[in-house]
Image: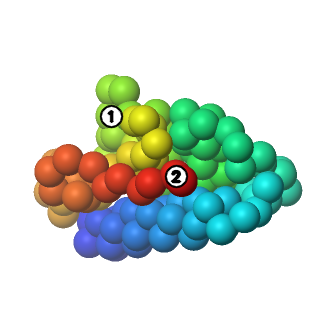
Amino acid sequence: MATAKVQSSTTNHANIKSFVTATLIKCATGSATVTLGSTVRDCSQNTRSWAGYFITYFNSINKNPYSGYTAITPSGGPRIGQTGIGSTNNHIAIRTNVGTESGRSAFLPASGWDYIIKE
């Protein structure tokens, strides 16, 4: 069961990173809006707003394999199974605590954050 939780968290991280990248590419290539779930979002919004949009979206569609929310703001976390989504300048920052089979914290990426540019 512990291995499955780590794998699920790892998959969540990869899916979140890919989806954020694809969404921001849509905005960069000329779309004025993008639909997240049933909500239309304006591409001209800043990265701080987009980080919040992504958190809301992922919590509505993903399940944390451990417990609690899947996506959170980066302050104070992320706890095991959670992905921190934040912003800095024109980047969305993503980091997931995938955990270990022994229940300790382990992060993706191992050090730092994945940064996705919003153009």
Q: Is residue 40 above or below residue 15?
A: above
Number of numbered discs: 2
Residue 69: image location, x then y, percent: 52, 43
Mark 2: amino acid: Lys
Seen from the viewer's position, the closer of residues 31 and 3 is: 31
Q: Quadrant of residue 38?
A: bottom right
Which of 23/83 is in front?
Answer: 23
Residue that carries the numbered disc 2 in the rendered image: 118
Instruction: Say which quarter of the image contains residue 12.
Output: bottom left
Residue drawn 23% across and 58% down? Answer: 109
Q: Position of residue 102 (x, y in %)?
A: 14, 57
Q: Is residue 47 above or below residue 101?
A: above
Spot occupied by residue 67 in the image (x, y as percentages of width and height): 46, 47
Which of labels 2 and 1 is toward the front? 2
Q: Is residue 14 something one can see in this rendering?
A: yes
Q: Is residue 82 left or right of residue 42?
A: left
Q: Give the CA separation, mark 2 to mark 1.
A: 23 Å
Which x, y percent locates residue 104?
16, 48
Q: Are marks 2 and 1 in contact (CB under 8 Å)?
A: no
- Of 81 and 3, nearer the camera is 81
- Give the residue drawn at x 52%, y 52%: 118
Give the structural element (helix, strand or loop) at label 2: loop
Q: Residue at x 62, y 61 (%)?
A: 28
Q: Which residue is mark 1?
A: 77
Dot 1 amino acid type: Gly
75 relative to 119 in the view: left or right? left
